[in-house]
Image (tube, helix red, strand yellow):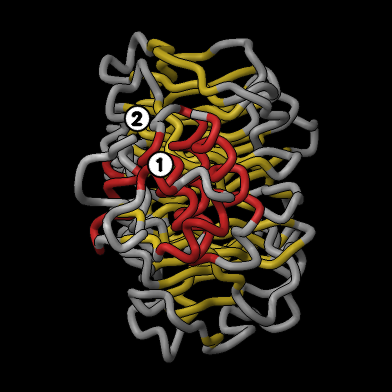
Amino acid sequence: MALARKLALKGAELREVDARDARWLGAAAVRLHADAQTREALADTLANDGLLDLNDVTRADEVAMTSDGSFVLALPVDEKVHWWELPREHTEMDVLDEDVLDRKGSEVDKMAMSADGATVLTAEHYEGLTVWDLDDRAHPRKTAFLSRAEFFDEIALSGDGTTALVAYEDLDGVVIAEVWDFRRRSHPARRSTLKVASDYLYGMAISADGKTAAAARDKGALVWDLTDPAHPVELHANDQGEESVALSPDGRRAVFGTGNGADVWDLSDRTKPVRVATMGGDFHDVFAVAMARKGELALTADYDGRAVLWDLSEPSRPVRLAGLKTGGRAVHAVALSDDGRTAVMGSPWGGPRIWDLSGVDRDPLGSFCRDGGAIPGEFWERYTDGQGSAYADGDGDFQLCDGVLAR
């Protein structure tokens, strides 16, 4: 155990210096003594080995990503929307057009995107809403502009791109949420208007089919049934302050970020939502949450720059999969691809960061061992100071993935 803890600590120290050695030492620690500490250390090493910073953008207050993880948007508030096409293996990044979504003379404050990336909605405070057609990404088209004089709090777009929620403050300071039909992008239609009992909305989310919506507000969570968008039904409200929200594609599960962690809610019976678990720890103001794998994976990030990937296969018993290095800066936005292999984060104090998470799962050593591996004898002896010889094979190597440990 002592040797395992020593190697795990050394592996963590080497993450940004020598990724290969960090992986080897982390895997060796788990091989010697698998416990929560050694598993977490290896999982964090594997996760952060897939980190890449996107180029040319120095801040990202909001981010969005297509369901397949191939297309990313980032918004530095009061600027333009930037985009990237991502190769599947994330080996290189290129900005195709830094100001591709540019309504001349405007400054974008909020944005939302459909799951296929074909529809993007942008909001410019006190100016209006612009609907973009990105079927041909080489030639984005502005299909509609809704002139509005409001200050927009939040906007959200369903995965299928047909339903939008737009929240703003009216002249009396009342928060209003409007439900919009975007099935005809050139002629959006407002279906209904909701008054929200709140001083401020921190986030909104809509299920992929547009039938369920949720909002995080200073006075608690809200859940709506939008099956009939002309007559939304408020299903649930509480008075516990919420700071962010994400919905599973089917709208049956929600994660709400709070001041001290993130709560998992079961919305299977939307008339009686049930909080089934809290993902706590050292979190402080969870401003960003995202979900993937049909709600079985969640990413949470907070004001202090802590970010954790969670397995929600058993929603009442969340399992920490890995901690993602954010550079010690507040994270305001996160997104996950549907398969959970790709994550992107945005911070007001740094540009968007992207992770390839394909090597992260409940069994970090099994993930590492997909390619097999052994630590050469010279390396093994150097890092174990002679304590590792009892575990080496006849050639002095330490087999990470095969054989039976001997002592």
Amino acid at dot 2 = Leu
Q: Which class describes the residues within 10 Å of circle 2: few (<14), some (14-19), or many (20+)?
A: many
Compared with 135, 9 (above or below) is above
Q: Picture coordinates of residue 235 (x, y %)?
A: 40, 16
Q: Is residue 293 visible?
A: yes
Q: Are marks 2 and 1 in contact (CB under 8 Å)?
A: yes
Quadrant of the rendered structure where residue 304 is? top right
Q: Is residue 112 visible?
A: no
Q: Picture coordinates of residue 10 (x, y %)?
A: 61, 49
Q: Which residue corresponds to the image point at 75% horizontal and 50% vertical from the top-left?
A: 328
Compared with 107, 192 (above or below) is above
Amino acid at dot 1 = Met
Q: Which residue corresponds to the image point at 56% horizontal and 54% vertical from the top-left?
A: 383
Disc 2 on helix, strand or loop? loop
Total labels: the figure holds 2
Q: Picture coordinates of residue 64 (x, y %)?
A: 50, 60
Q: Residue tagged by mark 2?
A: 312
Compared with 267, 227 (above or below) is below
Q: Which residue corresponds to the image point at 52% horizontal and 23% vertical from the top-left?
A: 279
Q: Is residue 325 left or right of residue 236?
A: right
For the C terminus, the quadrant is: top left
**Which of pointers 2 and 1 lies earlier in the amino acid sequence?**
1
Disc 1 on helix, strand or loop? strand
Q: Residue tagged by mark 1?
A: 291
Q: Picture coordinates of residue 389 (x, y %)?
A: 42, 48
